[in-house]
Image (spheres, rainbow, N blue to C red):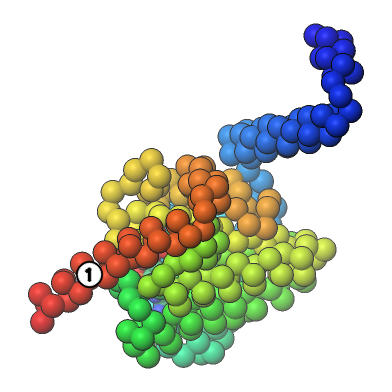
Amino acid sequence: MAEYILEQLKSQPSWLLLPITLGFLSLLKFAFSILKWVYVNFIRPGKNLKKYGSWALITGPTDGIGKAFAFQLARKGFNLILVGRHPSKLEEVSESIKSKYGSTQIRNVVVDFSGDLNDGVSRIKEVIQGLDVGLLINNVGVSYPYARFLHEVDDKLLSDLIKVNVEGTTKVTQAVLPGMVERKRGAIVNIGSGAAIVIPSDPLYSVYAATKAYVDQFSRCLYVEYKKSGIDVQCQVPLYVATKMASIRRSSFFVPSTDGYARAALRWIGYEPRCTPYWPHSILWALAYSLPESFIDTWRLKFCLGIRKRGQLKDSKKE
Ligand SMILES: NC(=O)c1ccc[n+]([C@@H]2O[C@H](COP(=O)([O-])OP(=O)(O)OC[C@H]3O[C@@H](n4cnc5c(N)ncnc54)[C@H](OP(=O)(O)O)[C@@H]3O)[C@@H](O)[C@H]2O)c1
């Protein structure tokens, strides 16, 4: 077979060999990327996360993705530091984790990321003192209640988005890093968003998307900065997950439940600096990259204008 192909190639005019070779190489590249996708999504084993340390710190663990991370990490045998804004909600989550995984030690830290951050971060520093914090999940995040133009974003929302998504993530990371550097091990997972990376624009969510672009670049730089110190930094890029923030109650093939997301997420920790752990999301990512940007921009704008209209209607009914 190979001989036959070689004979055929030799009989071709030399000007045709270059495009044939280029075509063959791009086919090979495509086949390789498919094989790699299958390997990383279905075959590659997750890392032994306990090698990073015995405690995991999770921000925003009282609902959505963060709560699912807390349960999944307790299941893996981690002790937890849960950082949230409502003491009663923190208590409730801790109790249900302990009732399911009795041996889990849990420390709750009350921090409102839209409030006094310096005060909150110093409480975190006190609690983690002397603990072997191996895993940091920077999950806390806020978005708009519904889509809106930038001139409709009020000062409080603008400040919350920047304080919670940007400052909160940065300062918690800064608080946890010294211990990891000292122990020469650790993993940091920052939750980004497809809004900043997968789609070329997220109109009517501009500030949210921009804060997540910050998280992405922040993570990439830290990945390089701390690799040699034994610390793996990663930005996870979920698309829609069924949570309060996404206003999606039911999961589906392309919209995982929080548990489905967190289970997939743990398998990726310690590998690539940027990933989308839930594999159907990676299909949407590939699709988005294969379509013209102007097409996605137009579709997204139309979609978000619809969300804005429904949100405004709801608001007017409340008044
Ligand atoms: N869901 C999605 O489709 C999606 C897609 C891409 C990226 N993400 C990202 O994933 C992360 C988690 O989102 P989610 O959908 O799980 O959101 P969620 O269900 O709204 O949960 C957010 C968590 O953050 C906490 N939180 C919010 N504001 C806070 C503040 N000021 N201080 C302290 N804690 C605060 C919430 O606490 P309470 O329980 O007290 O409200 C809750 O525990 C976010 O970073 C988000 O940007 C989500």
Asked if residue 153 lies left or right of residue 8, the reply is left
Residue that badge 1 annotates:
309
Asked if residue 242 lies left or right of residue 16, the reply is left
> In the rendering, at what x and y percent does residue 155 appear?
37, 90
Give 108 or 103, whichever is nearer the viewer.
Answer: 108
Can residue 222 be seen in this snapshot? yes
Give 101 or 87, whichever is nearer the viewer.
Answer: 87
Image position of 271 with respect to 32: above or below: below
Image position of 285 with respect to 84: above or below: above
Point 68% across, 66% down: residue: 220
Occupied quadrant, residue 5: top right
Q: Secondary structure at mark 1?
A: helix
Occupied quadrant, residue 136: bottom right
Image position of 59 with respect to 50: above or below: below
> In the rendering, at what x and y percent does residue 268 appear?
61, 49
Position of the N terminus, as image quadrant, is top right
Query: Regarding ligand 1, which quadrant of the image does it lie in?
Result: bottom left
Point 27% across, 65% down: residue: 307
> In the rendering, at what x and y percent does residue 55 appear?
59, 62
Asked if residue 202 lies left or right of residue 266, the reply is left
Occupied quadrant, residue 124: bottom right
Q: Categorize mark 1 by other alpha carbons within 10 Å: few (<14), some (14-19), many (20+).
A: some
Point 74% across, 33% down: residue: 23
Give 213 or 191, whichever is nearer the viewer.
Answer: 213
Position of the C terminus, as image quadrant, is bottom left
Point 62% across, 74% down: residue: 173
The residue type indicated by label 1 comes to Lys
Give 243 or 316, whichever is nearer the viewer.
Answer: 316
Can residue 62 be seen in this snapshot? no
Asked if residue 60 lies left or right of residue 4, the reply is left
> In the rendering, at what x and y percent does residue 90 appear?
38, 69
